[in-house]
Image (cartoon, helix red, strand yellow):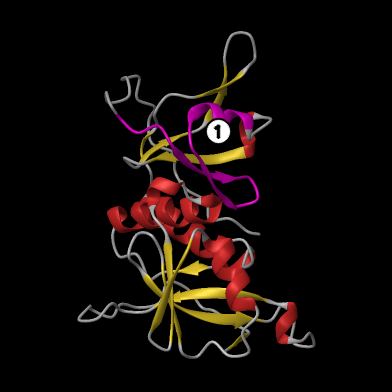
């Protein structure tokens, strides 16, 4: 894909803030996003310096990969705050290009804090949430059941003919309407997959959708 270019801030030599949660979201050289539970997991996922275009921690600080004196891959020094507009555009592009990998479609993130929260929550759920995160809830015509993870939700809904009266709630309390997505117009609906499109919570404020969702069928 044609990735949006961005300017790099000046490198800061200061140490990371004490007590900071050390999990990360990375944008690779194809423009796709991934979640990494630790610095060790992050480094194991990449093979060369330029493979990660951006690495962001929960505080919104931007990093890149570097080589130590022995030419081992390491996390480079902090570059400063991640550029919000670039990161949001890159996330929207990744959702369009990698539709089957990023199927939780939340409302448009209007601020840097909202974007960081959404990125970490969505990618944690796609990665396979830790049991401590909580369970999913599926409500069908008023009957509510619990599911361990998104894969269990998928399996249950894939056997249903219509999804019009189904609501799904993730462990972070966000509510979605499941919608079938065709992989191609000439393929049957069953050959596609399910997207989860956020809907307002009762009494909530409606915001613009995060991105266009094409090829949908209830």
Residue 88 in the image, given as x and y percentages of width and height: 43, 59
Category of crowding for the residue at label 1, using alpha-carbon neighbours closer than 10 angstroms: few (below 14), some (14–19), many (at least 20): many
Task: Please state if 7 lies on the left or on the right of 190 as rendered.
Answer: left
Any part of residue 102 in sight? no
Q: Residue at x 53, y 56 (%)?
A: 126
Above or below residue 74? Residue 96 is below
Residue 212 in the image, given as x and y percentages of width and height: 51, 78
Residue bearing the label numbered 1 = 42
Above or below residue 131? Residue 69 is above
Residue 146 in the image, given as x and y percentages of width and height: 44, 67
Any part of residue 202 in sight? yes
Q: Inspect the magenta stretch and tell me whether residue 30 lies in it.
A: yes
Name, please, the residue furthest toward the top.
Answer: 69
Residue 5 in the image, given as x and y percentages of width and height: 52, 51
Task: Please state if 154 lies on the left or on the right of 125 as rendered.
Answer: right
Task: Please state if 165 lies on the left or on the right of 172 as rendered.
Answer: right
Q: Residue at x 75, y 78 (%)?
A: 191
Name, please, the residue furthest toward the left.
Answer: 203
Q: Quadrant of the N terminus?
A: bottom right
Front position in the image: 196 or 116: 196
Q: Residue at x 70, y 77 (%)?
A: 192
Front position in the image: 165 or 55: 165
Above or below residue 150? Residue 7 is above
The image quarter containing residue 99 is bottom right
Front position in the image: 91 or 139: 139
Mark 1: secondary structure? helix
Q: Inspect the magenta stretch and tell me whether residue 51 lies in it.
A: no
The image quarter containing residue 185 is bottom right
Tell me which segment is drawn in magenta.
Answer: 20-44
Q: Quadrant of the C terminus?
A: bottom right
Count of marks, rendered view: 1
Q: Residue at x 31, y 58 (%)?
A: 114
């Amino acid at each position: 894909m044609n990735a949006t270019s961005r300017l790099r801030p000046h490198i800061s030599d200061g140490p990371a803030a004490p007590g900071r949660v050390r999990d990360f979201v990375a944008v690779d050289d194809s423009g796709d996003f991934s979640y990494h539970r630790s610095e060790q997991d992050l480094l194991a996922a990449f093979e060369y310096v330029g493979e990660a275009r951006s690495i962001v921690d929960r505080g919104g600080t931007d990093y890149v990969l570097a080589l130590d004196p022995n030419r081992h891959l390491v996390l480079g020094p902090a570059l400063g705050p991640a550029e919000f507009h670039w990161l949001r555009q890159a996330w929207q592009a990744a959702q369009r290009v990698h539709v089957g990998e990023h199927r939780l479609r939340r409302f448009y993130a209007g601020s840097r804090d909202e974007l960081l929260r959404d990125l970490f929550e969505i990618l944690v759920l796609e990665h396979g949430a830790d049991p401590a995160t909580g369970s999913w809830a599926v409500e069908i015509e008023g009957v509510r059941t619990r599911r361990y993870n998104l894969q269990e939700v998928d399996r249950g809904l894939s056997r249903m003919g219509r999804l019009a009266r189904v609501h799904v709630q993730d462990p972070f309390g966000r509510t979605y309407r499941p919608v079938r997505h065709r992989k191609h117009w000439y393929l049957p609906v069953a050959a596609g997959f399910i997207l989860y499109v956020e809907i307002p919570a009762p009494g909530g404020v409606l915001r613009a959708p995060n991105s266009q969702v094409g090829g949908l069928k209830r």
